[in-house]
Amino acid sequence: MNNFWSLVGFEYKKIFVRKSVLIAVLLALIATIFSVFTLVMGINPNTGISNYKEMLIDKEYSLAFSGTPLDKRLILKASKAYQTIPDGVYPYSDSVEYEKYARPYNSVYTLIDSTYAECGNGFDTNDLQEISEEDANSFYEKRINQYRINLENNSNFTKGNVDRIIEADNQIKKPFIMEYTDGYERFFSFSTTNAFIVMFLIAFILSPMFVNEYSQRTDSLILTSKNGKTSQIYAKIFTGVSFSIAISTFFLLIGYFLCMCVYGFDGANSPIQLHIPLLTYNFTMIEVAMILFATTIFGGFLMTAICFYLSSAMNNSIVVLAVSVTVVLLGMFNGIFP
């Protein structure tokens, strides 16, 4: 056992002795920080106010609605507020009326637009201004019907699948209670970027894991040594897996706490429907964050396995890295172009 841990320590030393690894981790950290702060950097050219200050203004408005049910009364109040926007103003957000009366209800508008959008047509501010009492009162019926239509138009779902998913909506408490959740919503939107940063980092660092033995001509010596087929291999696997867990967890925590520190920790126990209204899963924001942690770490496992397989089968680290990066890019483009 002592021999095993000595080998693990040696493998970690081989990783961190490479200056390129430290540079890659530093660049990944910079990319993570930049990705979190990018939306609050700079100044809004239309208002002349910094994006960070505008975020704080919207946060104050959202917090004012905390604890308010999303129901007919609130939807009609939002409609009345948007009716104050004068015709012919483009963009409408430049108007004094929007800033004074409608902007406080922007969080309501963004929550209901996907429900009232029909047959691919958008739900714009004019539609909100003209919404009827009947439509406002039937928000939750329209919401679930809209989601059913979306599922039925997806060939991957059978009628039985659709029925079970719709049935799951009965477990969700309604009406939704408004809460400020921008910290979690920003973390969710950032999670894809975070995952690809982690995958690229794992691919870059672990690709030479076995290749080095070929390039340094020590593979034959290791395989004929006493521990060549046991401790040495297990030490490499343990090092790679533990490293992927550590690096994934580190960047997830960095991203999470940066998002929370910038946007706020509020809304942890709010339903995920405040982020994606049409979903029927009975999860809270913090539960979804934990799921994202788990799936990203699992993705790190898969990336590590790919790197190990390629690294053990090839004798050129550049080829291994190129194939590993290609796998990551294919995953990224598959997410962008489903």
Image: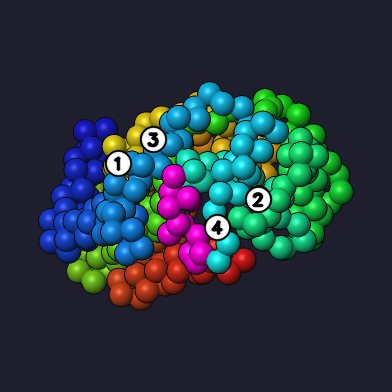
Foreground mark, 1 or 2, reads 2
Disc 4 residue type (three-letter): Pro
Please name the residue that numbered disc 1 is placed on: 262
Disc 2 residue type (three-letter): Gln
Tell me, yes or no, whether the highlighted magenta stretch contains residue 99. Answer: yes
Disc 1 residue type (three-letter): Val
Q: Secondary structure at mark 1?
A: helix
Label 1 vs 4, first from the N-terminus: 4
Q: In this rendering, would 37 be left or right of 71?
A: left
Between the C-alphas of marks 3 and 4, the distance is 25 Å
Label 2 vs 3, first from the N-terminus: 3
Quarter holding residue 70 = top right
Q: Which residues are magenta?
A: 89-100
Please name the residue that numbered disc 2 is placed on: 129
Residue 98 appears in the rendering: yes
Residue 292 appears in the rendering: no
- Quick one: label 3, few (<14), some, or many (20+) residues within 10 Å? few
Q: In this rendering, would 211 be left or right of 82?
A: left
Please name the residue that numbered disc 4 is placed on: 86
**Residue 119 placed where, x, y %?**
77, 61
Foreground mark, 2 or 4, reads 4
Q: Secondary structure at mark 4?
A: loop
Disc 3 residue type (three-letter): Glu
Q: Secondary structure at mark 2?
A: helix
Foreground mark, 3 or 1, reads 3
Q: Nearer the viewer, residue 176 or 79?
A: 79
Label 2 vs 4, first from the N-terminus: 4
| Residue shown at the point (26%, 33%) measured from the top left | 1
Please name the residue that numbered disc 3 is placed on: 60
**Residue 294 placed where, x, y %?**
47, 39
